[in-house]
Image (cartoon, rainbow, N blue to C red):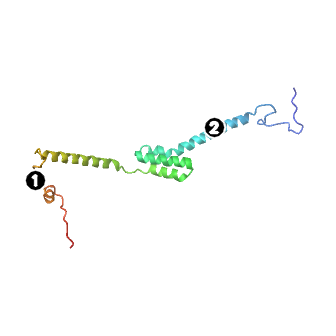
Amino acid sequence: MNEQLHPMTPHHLPFYIAKPGETDVLMIAMGIFLIAAVLAVGNLYLHLHSLPERMAHKSQKLQFEIVAVLGLLALFTHIHLFWIAALLLALVDLPDFGTPLRSIAGSVEKIADSKEEAGEASTSDDEGASTAPEATEPEIAKKTGAPTREVHDHA
């Protein structure tokens, strides 16, 4: 079959123009390139979007959870202020208040337990009466060196 070109067509056509009935290779290549570019840009966007969470992963659990929630809010609401807040919170190293407070609480519990045991040891009668005389507050303050509370009358 002899392919006849239209009489108005130029005699020399560029390589990227497909002849009738042939596959357009350039269109297929550009389609593959477009799909790859969309996937690459989407991957870059998600990688950049998760940056605050990856930065806060090394920090405290509460700070990480707040950063993660702010990141999700930014992702689903498209309010970029949430992402900026998450990034700033991930950059700031918050001081650890929980560990010292837990240590103080544990020490206070130990002190309370030891005083209860000392109180139980001072009761030797079967009736539960205390054999040790109760010390008044000024006597305790003298032994421990703590200041005494003074109540002043304003009358």
Say whether residue 27 is visible.
yes
- Residue ranking furthest to the front: 127
Mark 1: secondary structure: loop
Residue 128 lies left or right of residue 105; in this view the side is left
Q: Is residue 86 above or below residue 22?
A: below
Total residue callouts: 2
Q: Amino acid at mark 1?
A: Pro
Task: Name the foreground residue: 57 vs 23.
Answer: 57
Q: Amino acid at mark 2?
A: Ala
Seen at 44% across and 46% down, the residue is: 65
Where residue 59 appears, as percent x and y from the top left, is: 41, 45
Residue located beneath label 2 in the image: 36
Quote the CA–CA distance across marks 1 and 2.
87 Å
Residue 43 lies left or right of residue 57; in this view the side is right
Where residue 104 appears, as percent x and y from the top left, is: 28, 49
Seen at 55% across and 52% down, the residue is: 80
Q: Are marks 1 and 2 in contact (CB under 8 Å)?
A: no
Residue located beneath label 1 in the image: 133
Mark 2: secondary structure: helix
- Picture quarter with the C terminus: bottom left
Seen at 67% across and 35% down, the residue is: 32
- Picture quarter with the N terminus: top right
